Image (cartoon, rainbow, N blue to C red):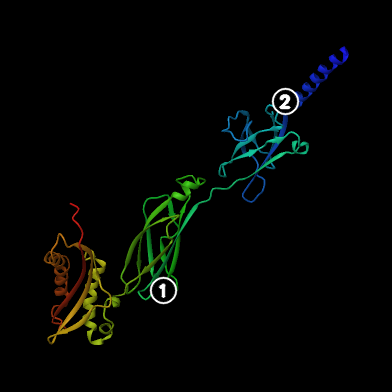
């Protein structure tokens, strides 16, 4: 009995020591990092910085167990190992590699790879953890600008010239002078190659340029505009050029006996359109015509005044006086300059359309 009593505690002790030794034994995990270019070909001489933690996430009370800088070989590879220790009575060996790869000709690449192993899976313990990193070259940002130029009937206008200028920015205009094709189309690009981090997606998406442009075509009025070109802006500019005939009544435009009068009126239109004679006011289409009243001929013009007048503050007299000063007085002086002495007409008929609105005075 004494021998049996002495043997049993000894067997228990040996078993406990054997179990403890098995759990606390560290393992070495081999890892291979492979760096490739955008064509999936090996890329040599890359600097690789690795920080290895004893947890699968560095924020989970993890400790650094290895930090090292490497240079990939001619095959774009590096091979190393790290010692992992399990915790308490667990069979899991936890670890993670945080890395970033640096190459002067490519964008910086960062990443993470979990390298945990299960101690009872013998076949997995011997497997090399592979990390493949495909580097990307920084490429210019390209914003396209597309124009479609047409007339009032939506018919494409060929051979319209487009001159583009831009505000100060890092972008470069590929072409600043364009000619529309038979479909009324013309395209160019703004190219960004410097002035920001080409590898930073947020910076790439945030750049923009304000462009100014003017469009001209023989016999049409010049059109000028501006547009901000960015990642999210509409790249298509659909422009309608106006021909002088668009403002004339079609019968009046076709009648040969009024050809001389039309040339005079055309000169007035040039003043209105090209020199911005009238502020916040536009001519009505298909309106210029000869109207008869009491056996006399009057040439008529129609205008749309773009302002909305406060009918609480202004009486109809006040509004009419403003329209007279801003539109009629200016027009009459130029009409008299160009049309006085024309035998086909005896006077002018000027019609102005505007809007009023009842709204409370916030003051």
Q: Is 134 positioned to the left or the right of 301 in the image?
A: right
| Residue at the limit of the structure toward the front, as seen here | 1
Q: Is residue 7 above or below residue 310?
A: above
| Residue at the limit of the structure toward the top, as seen here | 2
Residue indicated by mark 2: 24
Q: Is 68 positioned to the left or the right of 165 in the image?
A: right
Label 2 residue SS: helix
Alpha carbon distance from label 2 to label 1: 81 Å
Q: Quadrant of residue 302?
A: bottom left
Using a 10 Å C-alpha cutoff, classify the residue at mark 1 as few (fewer than 14 neighbours), some (14 to 19) or many (20 or more). Answer: many
Instruction: State the residue at coordinates (17%, 74%).
Output: 350
Residue 336: give x, y in percent of width and height: 14, 74
Q: Quadrant of residue 331?
A: bottom left
Q: Quadrant of residue 278?
A: bottom left
* Mark nearer the viewer, 2 or 1: 2
Q: Decide which of 58, 357 is in the foreground and name it.
A: 357
Using a 10 Å C-alpha cutoff, classify the residue at mark 2 as few (fewer than 14 neighbours), some (14 to 19) or many (20 or more). Answer: some
Residue 178 shows which numbered tag?
Answer: none
Residue 119: give x, y in percent of width and height: 74, 33
Q: Quadrant of the N terminus?
A: top right
Label 1 residue SS: loop
Earlier along the polypeptide chain: callout 2 or callout 1? 2
Q: Is residue 316 above or below residue 230?
A: below
Residue 223: give x, y in percent of width and height: 32, 66
Residue 142: give x, y in percent of width and height: 48, 55
Instruction: State the residue at coordinates (70%, 37%).
Output: 31
User: Is disc 2 in contact with disc 1, using a CB cutoff of under 8 Å?
Assistant: no
Residue indicated by mark 1: 156
């Amino acid at each position: 009995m004494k021998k049996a009593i002495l043997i049993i505690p000894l067997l228990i002790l040996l078993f406990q020591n054997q179990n403890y030794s098995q759990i606390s034994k560290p393992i070495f995990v081999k890892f291979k990092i492979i760096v490739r270019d955008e064509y999936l070909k090996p890329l040599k001489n890359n600097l690789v910085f690795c920080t290895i933690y004893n947890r699968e996430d560095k924020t989970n009370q993890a400790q650094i167990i290895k930090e090292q800088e490497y240079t990939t070989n001619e095959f774009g590879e590096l091979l190393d190992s790290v010692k992992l220790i399990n915790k308490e009575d667990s069979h899991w060996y936890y670890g993670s590699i945080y890395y970033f790869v640096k190459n002067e000709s490519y964008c910086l690449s960062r990443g993470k790879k979990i390298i945990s192993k299960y101690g009872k899976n013998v076949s997995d313990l011997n497997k090399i953890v592979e990390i493949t990193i495909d580097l990307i070259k920084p490429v210019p940002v390209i914003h396209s600008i597309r124009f479609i130029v047409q007339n009032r009937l939506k018919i494409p206008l060929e051979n319209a010239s487009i001159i583009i200028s831009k505000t100060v920015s890092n972008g470069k205009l590929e072409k600043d002078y364009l000619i529309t094709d038979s479909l009324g189309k013309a395209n160019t690009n703004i190219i960004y190659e410097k002035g920001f981090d080409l590898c930073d997606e947020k910076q790439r998406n945030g750049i923009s340029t304000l462009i100014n442009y003017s469009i001209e075509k023989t016999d049409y009025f010049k059109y000028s505009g501006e547009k901000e070109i960015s990642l999210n802006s509409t790249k298509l500019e659909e422009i309608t050029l106006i021909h002088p005939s668009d403002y004339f009544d079609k019968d009046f435009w076709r009648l040969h006996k009024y050809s001389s009068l039309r040339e005079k009126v055309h000169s007035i239109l040039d003043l209105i359109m090209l020199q911005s004679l009238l502020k916040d006011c536009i001519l009505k289409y298909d309106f210029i015509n000869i109207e008869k009243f009491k056996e006399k001929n009057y040439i008529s013009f129609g205008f749309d005044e773009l302002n909305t007048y406060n009918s609480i503050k202004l009486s109809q007299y006040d509004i009419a006086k403003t329209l007279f000063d801003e539109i009629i007085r200016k027009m009459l002086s130029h009409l008299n300059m160009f049309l006085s002495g024309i035998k086909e007409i005896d006077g002018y008929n000027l019609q102005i359309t505007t809007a009023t609105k009842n709204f409370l005075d916030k003051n």
